[in-house]
Image (cartoon, rainbow, N blue to C red):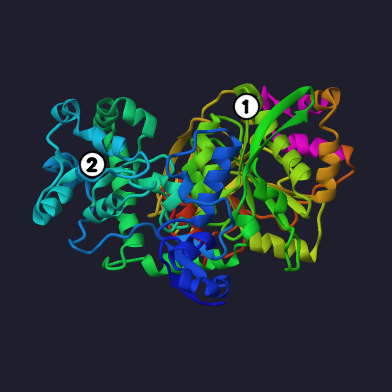
Amino acid sequence: KNHVIVSLHWLSFKDRYSAFFPALSRNYKKLQNVTVVQSYDPFAVLNLMKTYSAVDKNIPGYHHLYPFELPLTKAFSVGLMPGNTSTIQQPSYHAFKNSKFFLFYHSRHSDKQPFAFESSKYRDAPFNGTVVGNLPPSSIGHDISPNEWVDHVQSSQFCLVIRGDDPSSHSLANAIRAGCIPVIVSDDYEEYAGPLKSSLSLKDFCIFIKEADFLHDPLTELQKLLAIKKKHIINLLQWLEMAQRIMLPDHLNSLFVPAFLKELQLAQNRTVSQAIFEIKSNSMKIGHLSIPYKYPSRMEQIFANRTDQGPAIITVVMSKFKEIDQRHAIRNSWAHNHEVIFILTDGMWEDVENECIQYGNVVWFDGISKMQEGMLDTLLAFSFVELHIQFYDYVLKMDDKGFVYLDDARSLLSKNSQEYWGICDMLVLANRQKEGVYYEASVSRILNFFNGDTVFDLIYTEDGSKDTLEVDEIKPHGLGYFISHHFNKCLTSKLSSSKNVSRLISKSVVNGVFYDVLFIREMAKECKVQCNSSGWEWYGNKKLGKKEFIAADIQGGRNMICKFWDAQKERHVGEWTKDNE
């Protein structure tokens, strides 16, 4: 039960295992409780195949490799690991800028030894004379000596990673080791064989080119690399360095072992019903609107088999499709090991499909105008939970810039149940005051600030001198609130009436801006529920590092959320500056 097997490729699927290793098939049942470490993710493979089938997409040429059957083992992917045949090249912008080659790509002759499952056409596309002759100096070709190979890959800015006999390729791991930014031509790579997925996202340090676009015009797609801005290149290189630490056991500052153990723990705690799902479609009625949406079927099983005590909390996070970094940060910090649903009301399905398949926690609503987004996302989120999730006690609403201690909140709710708990009021502005080496944010009402005047915030610098910061735009902080299952049932029952929805929305608009907290407050009156903010504290009115809090609003993107999470594990914040406020 507590064993781990570093596996041969097909071990997770019984019929493949039996076919390749018939003498061992009689012992297969003994493997059902172990965790298998593989170069690909069998659960993601099955989800991909089911989704391709469900949405009538063309199934890739390699689909018949995989049966439509459940994997019998718990498993996770470490990806295709690189050999340690060369030293690890640390990524840096200086090395990037002074690289000898623009692009590195070497592959075998497909006419001598074709690639399986329609891969040869992608593999051969860069060898088109038009491509090679119209790029900056690049190392593109077939056979070169091992020493040349190492020298060229380590001297290139970008390394082309094209899918092979399946969606993955050893080229990715080799590029990571060489400190070369991977350019991936494989639509299903991250879902199929993304390495150590809970610690690493390929989108952080790789550039993706869609297979169809690459096949249509490889030169144009590769020339787009020349237009990438310096700031984005530096960001890619920083995350590439982190990828080296996570993926390479022989790195001087390797994080491979903790990342491996983290993935192992997640795999062991994951049930098959949580891991295997399909993408479903439906429509939801809010007032006179009927809004189509897509969601992973696993959500219908959330909490169905829970055995622990205490309130079951579903966290719904309002996000935009472009804010994938924020969602990654939340998955890897405060929502880790908790049920979270990201609500997206913008973008195209193609923008979020892979993320939905990979994580199984994204709900996408279609056909919503920009004007409707701010009004509807929270209402859609609460309605989705009530419609699809049977076993829950509370819904927590947060934004993707929010931060919350779910374990602490759950503990407090266990001791003192609430119908509506959290931020009951609206419009708070963080001002900074000095508290030791910390910058503390104090709360002030800003209803009277909606007059277009410039507002200045008083700042105390580290040496105690005063400075001012002009606040260009004043917005309410995205702090959340809990509502009970009982309150949510009452709330959502009132959303089918167009007249009722219009009336409540009209009471929730200030200066032309809709605020969901005002809408929920009006709903609370209708459902005869009182809001309670007692015990709901945030860093705006607590001394950082000295007292506890439940929730915070973190500006500054993914890095800040993750740094905040790391610091707050010890309930210590560290220094705040103008740049990272």
Gap between marks 1 and 2 measured at Cα: 66 Å
Mark 1 or mark 2: which comes first in sequence?
2
Q: Which residue is mark 1?
A: 450
Q: Report the front residue among 543 and 82.
A: 82
Residue 176 seen anywhere in this rendered image of the structure: yes
Amino acid tagged 2? Ser
Q: Report the front residue among 233 and 151.
A: 151
| Residue at 35% in and 35% down | 209
Amino acid tagged 1? Phe
Q: Which is more foreground, mark 1 or mark 2?
A: 2
| Residue at 32% in and 38% down | 232
Label 2, secondary structure: give it.
loop
At label 2, counting other C-alpha atoms closer than 10 Å, the crowd grade (few under 14, some 14-19, many 20 or more) is some
Q: Which residue is mark 2?
A: 110
Q: Is residue 247 magenta?
A: no
Give, as a single range, the part of the protein colored magenta: 503-525
Q: Quadrant of residue 43?
A: bottom right
Residue 440 seen anywhere in this rendered image of the structure: no
| Residue at 16% in and 28% down | 129
**250 displayed left or right of 299:** left
